[in-house]
Amino acid sequence: MANTSQSLRRAALLVSAVAVLGLTTACGGGSGTVSSPQTQSGTAAPAGGDPSADGSGTPVTSSTGSETDTATGSNSASTSSGASTSASSGSGVTSSSRCHTSELKATVGGNDPGAGQENFPIVLTNSSGRTCTVRGYPGAAFVNASGTQLGPNPVRETGSTATTVTLKPGQSAWAGLTFSNPEISGAKTATPTTLVVTPPDEKDPLKVTWTAGAVPVSGNSSSVRLTVFSAGTGA
């Protein structure tokens, strides 16, 4: 009877030892294998939680550009002079085809006012004996009798699309010069004697006598704006 009790006691101890060993192994004690954490499918939100960004991390921008002030005068180029205009996606015209300052005559056409704006065409005419081109914006500045510039440099209209204008001898191209009427805007004014015009990509300017009176030079709505050249005279 005693031998039977001892045998049962040893069997119970053996079962307990096996159970403890099994628990130790299950808890990762040295030789156990730990499975990788599971992941869930789906698209993560953009970093920073910016709702205006797409899934690639690149901000999504509007397809429309910023607004710019637009002159309300003659917006379509007159082609009565026969000058031709062509769009170009290249880097620009070559120096051999570009109209140089010495080959051009500058004039300022009549004012075409509208909606509180004063609008003047700056006209460049090919006075040489060869065909040449102009493309882009003119340089411009108002100066007084002593040659001092009045007001800041004009602002370029960013909405303008540059095209290459081919000018045969005697043909013209024009760019718009516009500003708010100072009597309406309340801007401070000065009366220039000369408009200095520099053809695109040239360094030497042309001088045109300014006879249209006072121009805004500072204060509210004092910006003078320029457009790119188009074929014709703007008339």
Image: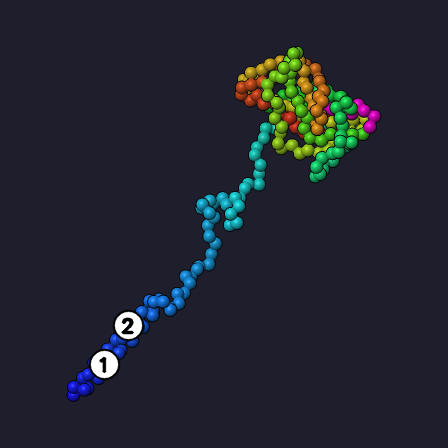
Q: Name the amino acid, label 2.
A: Val
Q: Indicate the quadrant where residue 38 lies.
A: bottom left
Q: How crowded is mark 1: few (under 14 residues within 10 Å), some or many (20 or more)?
A: few
Residue located 62% across and 28% down the image: 156
Q: Which mark is residue 120?
A: none
Residue 72 seen? no
For marks 2 and 1, the one nearer the N-term is 1
Circles 2 and 1, Cβ within 8 Å, touching? The answer is no
Residue 230 is a magenta residue: no
Residue 42, percent from left and from top:
47, 56
Residue located 62% across and 33% down the image: 159
Residue 45 seen? yes
Residue 199, percent from left and from top:
71, 25
**Whole-number angstrom distance, CA of label 2 to CA of label 1:** 15 Å
Q: Is residue 135 left or right of residue 19?
A: right
Please state, as top left, top right, bottom left or bottom right, where the N terminus lies in the image: bottom left
Which region is colored magenta?
122-130
Residue located 78% across and 30% down the image: 132
Please give the residue where the numbered disc 2 appears in the rendered image. 20
Please give the residue where the numbered disc 1 appears in the rendered image. 10
User: Secondary structure beneath disc 2?
Assistant: helix
